[in-house]
């Protein structure tokens, strides 16, 4: 398969009043995400992964010795991560459906405890990466990963992911990564989409 840059599920300025400005979206989606797509397609052409499903490319190229495989992994995993990231947000966010809310309460004691853990994971990810809410063998967990690594690499289902690369927040928050992640949870998450992955 060929990687394709999806359109955003909303306009570039749709999240502006919720803490993610139009310029961030123009750089992040139109330039950063597009670069992963373009580089991924160049690297996939003629490789052992050409024509494979995206999930199979990610798990098959993860943690390999060869530079070529690492390049494929980084770009294809980041393509997958960003396709999910755009869908995990919506203008104004949404209320957490009750089934997911009770799962979060069961796993973390309360939503506030989950939020603390999720923000702490993103803040403590040194350098670039992601923090996640994942389903691991029916159990909800908060994790963090470096660079393009994602829950697929560990056979986990990604319910929610927050991009903590500086390109995701520097225009809106400068160096204040904690404020960016808190705002992401408070005002941007499309919990209906997150819950649909349960
Ligand atoms: Mn990004």
Image (spheres, rainbow, N blue to C red):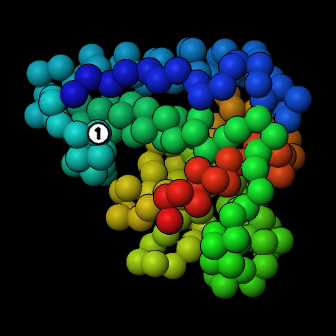
Q: Nearer the viewer, residue 89 or 115?
A: 89
Residue at 49% over, 35% down? 83
Q: Residue at x 71, y 48 (%)?
A: 189
Q: Is residue 38 above or below residue 126?
A: above
Examine the rendering and report whether any part of residue 177 can be seen: no
Q: Position of residue 11 (x, y in %)?
A: 69, 19
Percent across and percent down for residue 70 are: 31, 38
The residue that appears at 29% across and 46% down in the rendered structure is 55
Residue 13, horizontal then vertical, whole percent: 77, 19
Whether residue 165 is visible, yes or no, is yes
**Picture coordinates of residue 117, whole percent (x, y):** 73, 68
Comparing 179 with 12, the one in front is 12
Whether residue 149 sits left or right of residue 185 in the image: it is left
**Which residue occupies the foreground of this view, 186 or 9?**
9
Judge whether 72 appears above or below 178 on screen: above
Tag 1 residue:
54
Q: Callout 1: helix, strand or loop? A: helix
**Quarter of the image holding residue 52?**
top left
């Amino acid at each position: 398969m060929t990687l394709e840059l999806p359109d955003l599920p909303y306009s570039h300025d749709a999240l502006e009043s919720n803490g993610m400005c139009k310029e961030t979206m123009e750089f992040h989606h139109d330039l950063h995400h597009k670069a992963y797509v373009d580089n991924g397609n160049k690297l996939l052409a003629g490789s052992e992964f050409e024509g494979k499903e995206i999930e199979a490319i990610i798990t098959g190229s993860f943690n390999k010795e060869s530079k070529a495989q690492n390049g494929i992994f980084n770009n294809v995993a980041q393509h997958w991560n960003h396709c999910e990231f755009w869908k995990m947000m919506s203008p104004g966010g949404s209320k957490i459906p009750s089934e997911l809310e009770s799962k979060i309460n069961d796993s973390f004691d309360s939503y506030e405890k989950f939020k603390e853990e999720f923000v702490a994971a993103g803040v403590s990810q040194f350098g670039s990466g992601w923090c996640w809410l994942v389903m691991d063998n029916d159990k909800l967990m908060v994790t963090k990963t470096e660079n393009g690594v994602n829950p697929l690499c560990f056979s986990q289902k990604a319910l929610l992911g927050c991009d903590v690369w500086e390109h995701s927040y520097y225009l809106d928050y400068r160096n204040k990564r904690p404020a960016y992640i808190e705002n992401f949870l408070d005002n941007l998450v499309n919990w209906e989409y997150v819950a649909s992955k349960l």
